[in-house]
Image (spheres, helix red, strand yellow):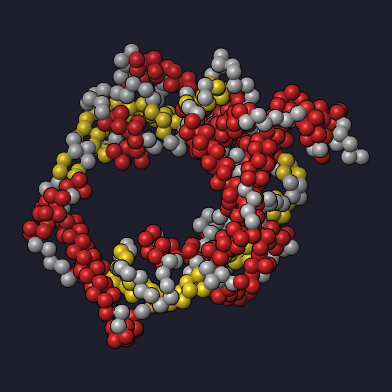
């Protein structure tokens, strides 16, 4: 939820339409030179290289930026394969877009580049004029040169021009925007008649023939999977880092050397309770949820624990388990109503209910801190851990180099471990899923272990995720996949048959009742069993329909008071449904919201255009990953 709050703050159009590429510019990745193949290469994009150097620079820039926004971010959060893969994906996208700009003849003139540089406030004197001395000094402090900065800015300007072309092509008129408004804000009340599966399943007494037939048709469900037992040696950054001795002097030196990364803007630390309400929800739902959150507010005024109420009631899955706690955030990080309410509080105070596009919030301000530098004492433990991990990372590579030579020479794993001063371990018999889960291996890596002969070892280290390490392993013994006999799985087969036959009975009953409902007498007979929903938009109807796409489609295309023409199977029931009331989008809101819907329509269209462009570029350009290990 915090991430969603951040993504929706600020300029909505740009952040929606160009969310795929915007990180490139936030992090100032730059593309560097794609022609030099002498240095290690991470990937090729259409035959041009993304070097290990520029990938590493992109990664370091991203980490620096993230730490400035959130000094409490841990090393683990910033060193995951997913984080690195996202950075590489941004580099690939940028390269593809720059190539498209070149083919389309999009250029940035020297005059345009000078104007862009001159407009940046950081390079201006007190009078607001561009100052070359300030420019060079600012770049020097950020460890870059005018040539490198201007190359990156040129790339940014080129893609912004592509953005401009997209904006021109994605103009949305009032009729189209109103159609979007009417489609999104339309709601329906549903009458439903439910037939739970369990009572029908309980009526079923499976015959031996039914059990045998089901068992034969679903044998794959009743197999004992293949299993193996391993002797293994994990080599992870965490294990090696735990043995590293880092002095306080080393930690202080690292803090002083990277002092700028610990500067932060003014920040707030808050907790919140969120009750979700879709932005397009009908007023009745908005008001009902407001009453619920006011009830929580009343409990707080009587002395209830904010943290306890957040854990029990908050619908923010990210913060609720932590008592509603959010990380420190700076101005612009949250959507404006949330930020304004938090800024108006003093530490310890709780806000009135606050409405954002996510729903109703109660906000408790925990603390404030002015712009400044995170004290050494607050980050020393994290810095020590980071230094230990950096040294451990270097040792991992050294150990792998030594081990690979010995593996190639046929040396047994126990002997290799002994030479490294380490000890191998032995596993129980494990199936494929257990091997993947316990060791953090991808399916392909686990399959290499199952393909080994007894006594043989893997020829290469296997990447362990998210442990940030590698596994050396030998197969001790294995057992093949076996089909479990019917008598061993009879209870499972009985339950499966009862459920399957119960579903058939429920469907038959629902069809019979549906035929009755077409007459006044039949409707009167079942009237007491009907349940009428609150007004539902398309988003909230997904939950009621269990995600059944056909039912969702039929609901919003049916006529009022009309029963849908078939029963629908949900997870634990079969249901009949009709439209009790179709509620059109409130016409009175159109004039007030017209500009928003025109903007959202254009933003959505821009996003579609840009996603189509990137999809086409991805489909027509060969992207080859060369060094997967650098992403682990």
Quadrant position of residue 149: top right
- Give the residue at the far right of this rendering: 127
| Number of on-image labels | 0
Residue at 36%, 74% (x, y): give it: 563
Looking at the image, residue 142 sits to the left or right of residue 423; the answer is: right
In the image, taking residue 287 as reference, residue 226 lies left or right, namely left
**Does residue 122 appear in this view?**
no
From the viewer's side, name the closer residue of 65 and 230. Answer: 65
For the residue pair 23 and 435, the one nearer the viewer reads as: 23
Q: Quadrant of the N terminus?
A: bottom right
Can the viewer see residue 142? yes
Examine the rendered structure and indicate whether residue 472 appears above or below residue 532. Answer: above
Residue 140 coordinates in the image, percent (x, y): 77, 27
Near-viewer residue (306 or 601): 601
The structure residue drawn at horizontal position 19% and vertical position 35%, both measured from the top left corner, is 479
Q: Please, is residue 72 above or below residue 509 in the view? A: above
x, y percentage for residue 466? 45, 38
Q: Residue at x 27, y 79 (%)?
A: 516
Q: Position of residue 171 (x, y in %)?
A: 64, 50
Residue 330 position within the rendered picture, expressed as x and y whole percent measured from the top left: 70, 50
Q: Vertical placement of 102 versus 530: above or below?
A: above
> Is 604 on the left or on the right of 478, as rendered?
right
Which residue is at a point 59% across and 31% down the rendered structure image? Answer: 100
Q: Is residue 31 above or below residue 494?
A: above
């Amino acid at each position: 939820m915090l991430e969603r709050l951040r993504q929706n703050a600020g300029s909505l159009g740009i952040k929606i339409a160009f969310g795929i590429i915007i990180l490139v510019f936030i992090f100032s990745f730059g593309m560097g030179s794609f022609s030099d193949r002498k240095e290690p290469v991470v990937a090729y994009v259409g035959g041009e290289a993304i070097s290990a150097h520029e990938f590493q620079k992109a990664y370091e820039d991203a980490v620096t930026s993230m730490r400035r926004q959130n000094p409490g971010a841990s090393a683990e959060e910033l060193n995951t394969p997913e984080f690195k893969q996202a950075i590489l994906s941004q580099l690939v996208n940028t390269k593809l877009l720059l190539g498209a700009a070149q083919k389309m003849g999009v250029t940035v003139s020297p005059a345009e580049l000078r104007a862009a540089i001159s407009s940046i406030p950081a390079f201006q004197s007190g009078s607001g004029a561009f100052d070359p001395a300030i420019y060079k000094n600012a770049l020097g402090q950020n460890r870059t040169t005018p040539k490198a900065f201007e190359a990156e800015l040129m790339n940014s300007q080129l893609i912004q021009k592509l953005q401009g072309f997209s904006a021109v092509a994605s103009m949305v008129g009032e009729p189209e925007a109103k159609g979007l408004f009417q489609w999104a804000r339309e709601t329906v009340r549903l009458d439903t008649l439910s037939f739970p599966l369990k009572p029908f399943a309980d009526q079923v007494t499976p015959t031996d023939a039914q059990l045998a037939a089901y068992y034969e048709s679903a044998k794959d469900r009743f197999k004992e999977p293949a299993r193996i037992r391993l002797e293994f040696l994990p080599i992870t950054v965490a294990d090696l880092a735990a043995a590293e001795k880092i002095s306080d002097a080393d930690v202080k030196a690292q803090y002083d050397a990277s002092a700028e990364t610990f500067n932060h803007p003014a920040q707030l630390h808050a907790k919140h309770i969120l009750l979700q309400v879709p932005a397009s929800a009908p007023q009745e739902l908005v008001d009902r949820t407001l009453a619920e959150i006011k009830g929580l507010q009343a409990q707080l005024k009587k002395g209830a624990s904010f943290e306890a109420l957040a854990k029990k009631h908050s619908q923010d899955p990210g913060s609720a388990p932590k008592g509603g706690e959010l990380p420190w955030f700076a101005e612009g990080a949250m959507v404006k109503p949330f930020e304004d309410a938090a800024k108006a509080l003093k530490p310890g105070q709780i806000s009135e209910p606050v409405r954002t596009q996510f729903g109703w919030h109660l906000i408790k301000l925990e603390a404030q801190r002015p712009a400044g530098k995170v004290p050494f004492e607050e980050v020393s433990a994290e810095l020590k851990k980071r230094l230990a991990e950096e040294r451990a990372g270097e040792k991992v590579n050294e150990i792998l180099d030594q081990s690979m030579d010995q593996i190639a020479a046929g040396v047994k794993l126990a002997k290799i471990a002994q030479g490294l001063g380490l000890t191998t371990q032995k596993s129980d018999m494990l199936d494929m899923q257990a091997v993947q889960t316990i060791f953090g291996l991808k399916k392909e890596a686990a399959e290499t272990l199952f393909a080994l002969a007894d006594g043989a070892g893997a020829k290469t280290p296997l990447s362990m995720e998210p442990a940030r390490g590698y596994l050396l392993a030998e197969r001790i013994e294995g057992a093949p996949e076996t089909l479990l006999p019917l008598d061993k799985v009879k209870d499972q087969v009985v339950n499966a048959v009862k459920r399957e036959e119960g579903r058939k009975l429920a469907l038959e009953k629902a069809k019979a009742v549906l035929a009755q409902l077409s007459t006044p007498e039949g409707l009167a007979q079942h009237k007491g069993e009907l349940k009428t929903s609150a007004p539902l938009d398309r988003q909230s109807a997904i939950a009621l329909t269990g995600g059944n796409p056909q039912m969702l489609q039929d609901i919003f295309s049916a006529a009022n008071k009309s029963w849908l023409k078939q029963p629908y199977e949900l997870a634990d029931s079969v249901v009949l449904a009709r439209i009790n009331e179709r509620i059109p989008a409130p016409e009175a809101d159109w004039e007030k919201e017209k500009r928003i819907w025109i903007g959202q329509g254009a933003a959505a269209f821009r996003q579609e255009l840009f996603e189509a462009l990137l999809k086409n570029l991805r489909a027509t350009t060969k992207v080859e990953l060369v060094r997967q290990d650098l992403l682990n």
